[in-house]
C-alpha cells in the first residue's frame, strides 16, 4: 500500500525544481554572456585589424614622394583596407595649373580615371554648416544623376556614398569620394569623425606632394619663357629614347635659333628682346602637341622633342613653326614692332640606335639637329634643313 507524500517531502521537490530552473536560467544567462563576450572580442579584434590597416595606409601615403605615387596608393589601397567599391578624388584646379604641370612632369592620367579635376569649389556640391564654418561630409543613397560623374570607372552597382571635403587651413581644396554597394554603409545618421580624419591626412599629403611637384617643375622650367630648361630636355630625351625602344616608335628633334637676335636687343633693348623670346616660345608651342617637349637651351636657342614623329612629319611641323614666326610681326611694348625669323635644324633617331647606349644616341640626335641648324644659317636663315641622324 502506497504511502501518502508528506508535506515536507512535497516542499523539498518544489525547491529542487526551483533550484534546477535557477541553475538552468543561470546557464542560459552565462551562455548568452559568453556569446556576447565572444562577439565583443571578435569586434575588438576586427576593429583592431581595421585600425592597423588604416594606420599602415596612413604611413604609406605620408611616405609618397610623387603625385602619381600618392594617388596610385590611395586608389589601390584604400578600397581594400576600407572595404569600399569606389574611391575617387576631386581636386579644385581653377586654371588647370595642377593638371598641366603634372602632365608636363610625365603623369599619365589615363592610368588614373579616379582622379578628377574641377574648376570651382561650387562644383563639389558642399554646403557650409554655418557662416564661416567648414563644409560637412555628405552621406546618403547613391544617385546616378548626382554622383555618377564622381565614379566614372565603377564596375559594380553603387548604393551609398560619402563625399568628404578635403580641407587645408579651412580652405576647400577638393573632395574624397567614397562609395559602397551596401545601401546601409553610408547614411546621414552615421558618425563621420573617422572619415573626416582620413580625409584630413589625405589633404595634407596632397598639398605637400603637389607643392613639391610644383617646385620640381619650377626647377625644370625657364623662368623667362615658361618652357622647359635644358636640364629637363636632357633628362626627358633619355626617357623618351628608352620608351621609343620599347614601344618601337620614332623620335625627332628640332634645334631652333632666332635669326639676328642681337639686332633685336640693339634696336628694342633687352626688354624688347625678352618679349620676343616669350612670343617665339608661344608660337612654337602653339604648333606642338601636348606630348611634345619644348625647351630653351639658353640665349635665343630652343630645342623641341617630337614624340612618335618621323623625319618627314617633323620637317612639316618645323615649316609651320618657321612660317608662324616669320608670317606676322611681333608687337612689343610701347607700340613697337619687330620682324623676327628663325632657322631650324631637324634630325631623327638613327636606324641603328638600338645598338648604341642611350646617352650616346641622345647626344648624336641633338648634335645632328644642331648641324642641320648650322646648314640652315649658312643657307641664308629663315630656313628649315633636315638631316637624318
Image (spheres, rainbow, N blue to C red):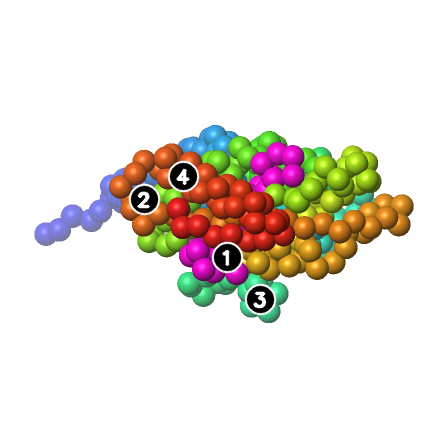
* Disc 2 element: helix
> What residue did someone put label 3 on?
143
Any magenta on residue 302? Answer: yes
In the image, residue 74 lies at what x, y percent?
47, 43
**What span is in magenta?**
292-316
Q: Quadrant of residue 211?
A: top right
Q: Which residue is the site of mark 2?
A: 353
- Name, please, the residue furthest toward the bottom: 145
Q: CA distance from mark 3 to mark 2?
A: 55 Å
Gap between marks 2 and 4 measured at Cα: 10 Å
Return the disc, 2 or 4, that comes first in the chain's sequence.
2
Cα–Cα span, label 1 and label 2: 20 Å
Q: Which residue is mark 1?
A: 315
Looking at the rendered structure, which numbered label has been put on residue 364? 4
**In this view, the mark in front (3 or 4):** 4
Which label sits in the foreground, 1 or 2? 1
Foreground mark, 3 or 2? 2
Identify the residue at horizontal 81%, vertical 40% (top origin): 267
Image location of residue 146, percent across then percent down? 61, 65
Q: Secondary structure at mark 1?
A: helix
Q: Earlier in the sequence, mark 3 or mark 4?
A: 3
Amino acid at each position: 500500500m502506497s504511502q501518502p507524500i508528506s508535506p515536507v517531502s512535497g516542499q523539498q521537490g518544489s525547491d529542487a525544481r526551483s533550484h534546477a530552473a535557477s541553475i538552468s536560467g543561470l546557464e542560459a544567462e552565462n551562455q548568452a554572456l559568453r556569446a556576447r563576450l565572444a562577439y565583443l572580442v571578435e569586434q575588438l579584434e576586427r576593429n583592431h585589424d581595421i585600425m592597423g590597416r588604416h594606420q599602415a595606409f596612413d604611413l604609406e601615403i605620408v611616405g609618397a614622394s610623387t603625385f602619381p605615387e600618392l594617388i596610385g596608393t590611395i586608389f589601390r589601397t584604400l578600397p581594400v583596407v576600407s572595404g569600399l567599391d569606389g574611391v575617387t578624388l576631386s581636386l579644385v584646379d581653377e586654371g588647370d595649373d595642377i593638371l598641366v604641370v603634372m602632365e608636363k612632369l610625365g603623369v599619365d592620367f589615363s592610368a588614373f580615371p579616379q582622379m578628377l579635376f574641377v574648376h570651382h569649389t561650387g562644383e563639389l556640391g558642399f554646403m557650409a554648416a554655418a557662416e564661416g564654418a567648414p563644409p560637412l561630409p555628405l552621406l546618403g543613397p547613391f544617385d546616378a544623376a548626382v554622383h555618377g560623374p564622381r565614379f566614372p570607372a565603377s564596375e559594380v552597382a553603387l548604393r551609398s556614398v560619402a563625399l568628404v571635403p578635403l580641407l587645408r587651413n579651412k580652405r576647400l581644396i577638393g573632395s574624397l569620394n567614397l562609395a559602397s554597394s551596401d545601401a546601409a554603409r553610408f547614411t546621414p545618421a552615421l558618425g563621420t569623425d573617422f572619415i573626416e580624419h582620413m580625409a584630413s591626412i589625405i589633404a595634407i599629403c596632397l598639398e605637400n606632394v603637389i607643392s613639391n611637384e610644383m617646385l620640381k617643375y619650377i626647377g625644370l622650367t625657364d623662368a623667362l619663357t615658361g618652357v622647359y630648361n635644358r636640364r629637363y630636355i636632357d633628362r626627358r630625351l633619355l626617357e623618351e629614347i628608352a620608351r621609343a625602344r620599347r614601344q618601337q616608335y620614332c623620335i625627332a628633334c628640332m634645334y631652333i635659333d632666332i635669326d639676328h637676335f642681337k639686332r633685336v636687343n640693339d634696336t628694342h633693348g633687352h626688354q624688347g628682346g625678352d618679349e620676343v623670346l616669350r612670343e617665339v616660345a608661344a608660337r612654337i608651342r602653339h604648333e606642338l602637341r601636348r606630348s611634345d617637349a619644348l625647351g630653351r637651351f639658353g640665349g635665343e636657342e630652343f630645342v623641341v622633342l617630337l614624340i612618335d614623329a618621323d623625319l618627314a612629319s617633323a620637317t612639316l611641323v618645323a615649316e609651320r613653326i618657321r612660317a608662324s614666326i616669320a608670317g606676322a610681326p611681333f608687337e612689343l611694348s610701347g607700340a613697337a614692332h619687330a620682324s623676327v625669323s628663325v632657322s631650324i635644324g631637324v634630325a631623327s633617331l638613327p636606324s641603328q640606335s638600338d645598338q648604341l647606349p642611350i646617352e650616346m644616341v641622345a647626344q648624336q640626335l641633338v648634335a645632328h639637329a644642331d648641324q642641320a641648324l648650322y646648314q640652315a644659317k649658312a643657307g641664308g636663315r629663315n630656313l628649315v634643313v633636315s638631316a637624318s641622324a
